[in-house]
Amino acid sequence: MLSIHDLTSVKIEHYQGAYIQHEAYVKYPLNADINGRNVLLLDDVCDSGDTFTVGVEHIRQCGKVNEMRTAALHLKTVSKYIPDFYVEEVSEWRWLIYPWAVTEDLSSMLAKMQLTNPDVTLLQRLIKQRHDIDVSPRQIEDALMLLQGAEK
């Protein structure tokens, strides 16, 4: 939509689904020549700020950029890192579920429940009770399929 076709990515993990890991780390490093380039490091949410801190350091180790900026859709006020750009500030802490992460987040919540022979209707009710999230039967089924694939 922005006519920007020169893109690459780096994967930094800090959460596994809806649950935090010990510390943020680069899982898949940058694989591009960024020397002399302008770089925008983008993430959906700036929560603790750890992912941005690790990402900025990783970019600096990968080359000498012309200019680097950071951006996020949401900035939580508890963050130790403030991106250069953000769309919305979140002052009351809450878990944000983005459309591209629904299945992953739900599957991690369901895995923590450790239920045998899960019933979709029961799981819908439990997710609502425990997390105040309304989910469709299809979303539950997709999350269960992801869990089954992870077990193999």
Image (cartoon, helix red, strand yellow):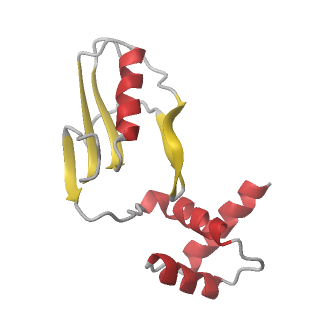
Q: Nearer the viewer, residue 145 or 133?
A: 133
Which of the 4 quarters of the picture holds residue 17? bottom right
Residue 78 lies left or right of residue 33; in this view the side is left
Residue 138 versus residue 64 in the image, above or below:
below
Q: Residue at x 28, y 17 (%)?
A: 37
| Total numbered circles | 0
Task: Measuring from the top left, give residue 72's x and y in whole percent.
Answer: 28, 46
Residue 63 versus residue 59 in the image, above or below:
above
- Inspect this view and state whether residue 10 appears: yes
Residue 105 versus residue 141 in the image, above or below:
above
- Inspect this view and state whether residue 7 appears: no
Residue 35 lies left or right of residue 67; in this view the side is right
Quadrant of the image for the N terminus?
Answer: top left
Quadrant of the image for the C terminus?
Answer: bottom right
Q: Nearer the viewer, residue 68 or 56?
A: 56
Task: Measuring from the top left, give residue 35's x and y in whole percent.
Answer: 33, 12
Task: Measuring from the top left, give residue 104's x and y in whole percent.
Answer: 56, 59
Q: Residue at x 64, y 73 (%)?
A: 141
Q: Nearer the viewer, residue 38 or 5?
A: 38
Task: Measuring from the top left, give residue 140's x and y in whole percent.
Answer: 59, 74
Q: Which residue is most to the right?
A: 152
Q: Residue at x 66, y 66 (%)?
A: 111
Residue 22 lies left or right of residue 76; in this view the side is right
